[in-house]
Amino acid sequence: MPYLIDGHNLIPKIPSLSLSAPDDEMQLVAMLQEFCQRRRRTVEVYFDNAPPGQPRARQFGAVTARFVRQGTPADSAIQARLQRLGRAARNWTVVSSDHTVQASARAVRAQVLAAEEFAALLAATLSASPDDPAARAQPELSEQELNAWLALFGGDESLEE
């Protein structure tokens, strides 16, 4: 499941990063590249307050960094992206602790992960040895997907109660 990440919301949740660092965004992108490689995922990370003249989007392997121009918050860009995804938004996980962004994600049935939770997942993934099976991608099924599979293959029990 790919991730849509509110970059400036995530940076303060990672102990080794600081919003006051001049290269905080690229430090986060480097961490996300490693995360994507180990987890076999893709990420779109949004940063607001991009200076004029900077490209709007840059590709870094499985990480797409989207730089939102000054005057427009990254939150609005994430919400617009979710709207453009339409029904496919349910296949994405939105990473933000901003309640408005979370509500927008839930409205289109996207998964929501608080920035603190993702920071912990990121730290665990990056601290694990690359050869450690825990560092490799694990299939992530939602409760709904698991129940659908159980129903399809004759499972007697559902996770919903």
Image: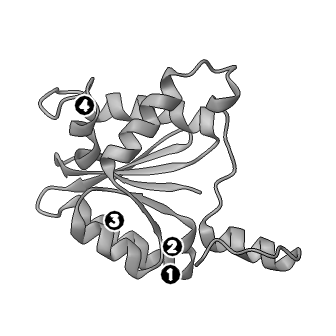
Q: Which residue is mark 3?
A: 78
> For this view, does 60 lie left or right of residue 148?
left
Q: Label 3, label 2: how many angstroms apart (C-alpha)?
A: 11 Å
The amino acid beneath tag 3 is Ile
Q: Quadrant of the N terminus?
A: bottom right
Residue 69 appears in the rendering: yes
Identify the mark at residue 89; answer none if there is no mark. 2
Q: Label 4, label 3: how many angstroms apart (C-alpha)?
A: 20 Å
Give the camera-side residue of 78 and 145: 145
* Mark before the other along the chain sequence, 3 or 2: 3
Residue 156: quadrant of the picture: bottom right
The amino acid beneath tag 2 is Ala
Q: Which residue is mark 1?
A: 86
The single residue placed furthest to the right in the displayed view is: 153
Element type at mark 2: helix
> Tags 2 and 1 in contact by the CB under 8 Å rule?
yes
In this view, 54 is above or below 141: above
The amino acid beneath tag 1 is Gly
Tell me which residue sits at (18%, 62%) in the image: 73
* Mark before the other along the chain sequence, 4 or 2: 4
Q: Which residue is mark 4?
A: 24
> Tags 3 and 2 in contact by the CB under 8 Å rule?
no
* Mark before the other along the chain sequence, 1 or 3: 3
Q: Label 4, label 2: how many angstroms apart (C-alpha)?
A: 28 Å
